[in-house]
Amino acid sequence: MGSKDSIFPKARIPYGTWGSSFFPAWQMSAMAEVNIGQFAAEAMSYIMGKRDVPLSELDYLVSGSTIPWHWKFWNSPFLAHCAGKRVPGYHVEQACATGMKAVYLAAADVQGGAGDVVGVLTFDRTSDSPVGIFPERRSYERTIALSDVWDNFGFDPATGQAMMTTAGNAARKYKLDRKEVDELTFYRYKQYFNALETGMLKDVLVPLELLNLQGKPIGKIDSDAGVRSITMEALRAMNELDTCITSGTQTHASDGMATLLVTTSEKAKELSKRPEIDIQIISKTEVRTLPALMPEAPALAVKKILADTGLTMNDMTVVKDHNPFALNDAIFAKELNYDWHKMNNTGCPLVWGHPQGPTLTRIIIEALDETVRLGGGYALIFGCAAGDVGIAAIFKVTDGGK
């Protein structure tokens, strides 16, 4: 197999059989009031209905989330039940890399013959996230309470440092300039609002209505609530929390879900709205950098995947990343000698938020949709994850109708 051939030659992502909710910020929508797993599964059913994909086609389900939710023990089989098709499956969790890992594992399942149509369903709700109580016999405190979101973001048990500290460490290592990081952030906001205004996200983001237990409407999720336009003057005036980091140059906690299908090439032609579009996973890689330097890990992962495939940045039609800190992109630009203006054309998590589980799934969907609009080619998608991990994947989009 050549270096540019797919690692899963049987697997395809059928064009258009995908969708994401908007990602409202923490506590800013009715999504804070629902069981996020049940909501995500019902939303998957609704989205597939809008895409004219009957769930009777589903053979298997790979789900992914990072924050405990009520009935999580039952994971994918329960979610499949809520979606309306009782199929087997399993749950995956790898911090912010969860969305990409779920897609990769679904492709592996198709390649291995687990099913012709494997669903990917990823979600998380940071709002009202649970607090766990742990018996701890090794400590003078016999009972430890842990706030799943805030305590984990504030403390890496392997290094004792917060995630924001890893960003400050990386900014100092790469001698980043605060002015560039602010300018990069301002540009990312412009990209996002331009994508909304020009309709580039209309085939990706699906407005969803939430119902209470009685089936009555309690709210509509039809925007990335909490995202507001920002000025350079406002960014420059913000207090620096660590080197090159302000409240404006990092992402925010949010809620959401995203879903897509991975199928055989035959099923992709059958289910896709445009069967002439062929989407393959070419390669995926992960690296782990030195302790407490998480924001540099994605750039290292990209370097490795390019070396593995023999491709270059010039071969990429679309480049998108999971960037919880704006300086992730600045480091990537330095390491790869790449113009950060050319990536994240339709928005990114820095702007629209960070619900972990579905974050990279939404990025993948946005990137593939953009690549199709541009006539095909390679899409490079990458990001970081807790534990100083970098993950990257390359997808190939071919338009056979041209």
Image (cartoon, grey):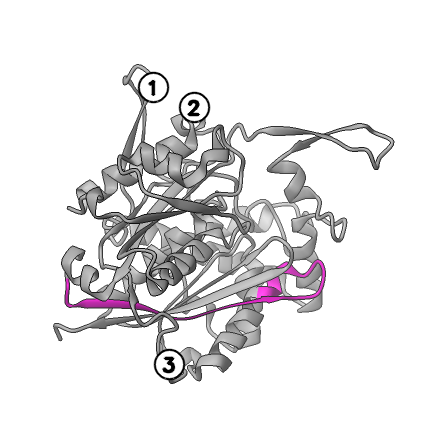
Q: Secondary structure at mark 3?
A: loop
Residue at image x 23%, y 50%? 203
The CA span between labels 2 and 3 is 46 Å
Picture quadrant where residue 122 is located: top left
Which quadrant, please, contains the C terminus? bottom left
Asked if disc 2 and disc 1 are in contact, CB closer than 8 Å, the reply is yes
Asked if disc 1 and disc 3 are in contact, CB closer than 8 Å, the reply is no
Q: Give coordinates of residue 295: x percent, y percent.
A: 60, 60
Q: Residues within 10 Å of mark 1 (few under 14, many from 20)?
A: few
Residue placed under numbered mark 2 in the picture: 33
Checking the image for residue 212, the label placed there is 1
Is 291 covered by the magenta stretch? yes
Q: Residues within 10 Å of mark 2 (few under 14, many from 20)?
A: some
Residue at image x 39%, y 73%? 7
Picture quadrant where residue 105 is located: bottom left
Query: Relative to the observer, which residue lies in front, 312 or 123?
Result: 123
Residue placed under numbered mark 3 in the picture: 4
**Residue extent of the magenta highlight:** 275-297
Q: Secondary structure at mark 1?
A: loop
Residue type marked 3: Lys
Query: Relative to the observer, which residue lies in front, 51 or 333?
Result: 51
Q: Give coordinates of residue 207: x percent, y percent.
A: 27, 37
